Image: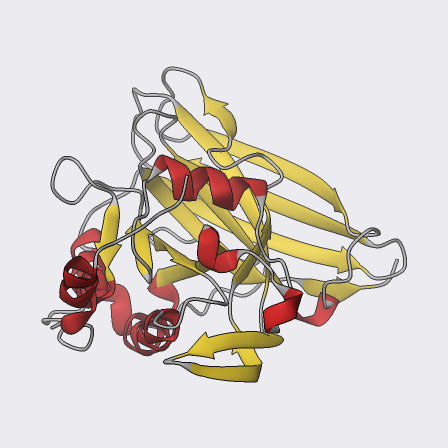
Amino acid sequence: MKHIVGLGALVLWLSTAGCDVITPPYTRSITTDTTSQGSGIVRYRKVLIEEFTGAQCTNCPIGHRKLADLARVFGDSIVIVSIHAGDFARPDARKGYPDDFRTPAGEELNSRFRVFAYPAAVINRTQIDGTSYVIGVQNWGSALNTQLRTQTPFAISTYSSCDTLRNTLTVNITIELMADVSYPVNIGYYVIEDSIVAPQLDNGTYVADYVHRHVLRDAPLGAYGQALISTTATAGTTFERTYTYDLSQTTWDRRHLEVVVFLARPEPEYTIIQCDGRHVELVQK
């Protein structure tokens, strides 16, 4: 299904792109997470922002730059995933866009959340008005600020390593319950490649060496994850999960790999309850 937006709606969508006001207090947002790989557990809530974009989307770099600004404000309290999906993400070598960054999970989320104009984002997979998950770029900062003020019952620690000899990615996750949970929860993770140099249309200009950040490469447990808690769990419960991912058939730059882990309500609610994003450590075993 093609996502088409009228000119008037698109103008309204983008007209206030630079007008987002982020009001203090910033709570944890200006405190850098100093938890080193695998050495500690994050007990405050992090917020997942899933940006929908495409190389042939001329307005999407507005969103890319907005995310860079928000990362400077909110630091490690936010976790960014850039999802290339929809018509603007279709490769077209004849026009100079040979790269295909689409994924099955990205296309699923793009369709499920009914992304109709780009750039757009879904923040913690939370509905903003009781009907829509999609947030225009002008409101990303205020939505993030709102989500950071909420609590989570989950503390999380993640550590990911890439064995460069065996071409395997290993993801280790520890989860502690800080309060009772009386609803089902899924666990999922994304494999991300950062700093990919590839063409991008930017405000009508073809940029051959554009740097694409936080690009979703795969969601091994699916777009919505797999069951972690089926019904209930009590405070003090600890979960440990280890996942192994085969990188042998990929050409991704191992130096720029990241893993994003998320805990979420299963569909049809979708809400992200906790997340964490870390760079992948390169090892040789």
Q: Is residue 213 something one can see in this rendering?
A: yes
The residue at the point 88 percent across, 53 percent down is: 166
Closest to the observer, 179 or 4 = 4
Residue reaching furthest to the top: 231
Q: Residue 154's spot in the image, x, y percent?
A: 37, 40
Q: Residue 211's spot in the image, x, y percent?
A: 55, 78
Please, is residue 22 above or below residue 262 in the view? below
Task: Quarter of the image for the N terminus: give it.
Answer: top left
Q: Residue 243's spot in the image, x, y percent?
A: 68, 39
The residue at the point 78 percent across, 62 percent down is: 251
Please, is residue 145 above or below residue 177 in the view? below
Snapshot colouring: secondary structure
Q: Quadrant of residue 265?
A: top left
The residue at the point 59 percent across, 71 percent down is: 95
Q: Is residue 41 something one can see in this rendering?
A: no
Q: Quadrant of residue 159?
A: bottom right
Q: Quadrant of residue 141?
A: bottom left
Q: Is residue 22 left or right of residue 254?
A: left
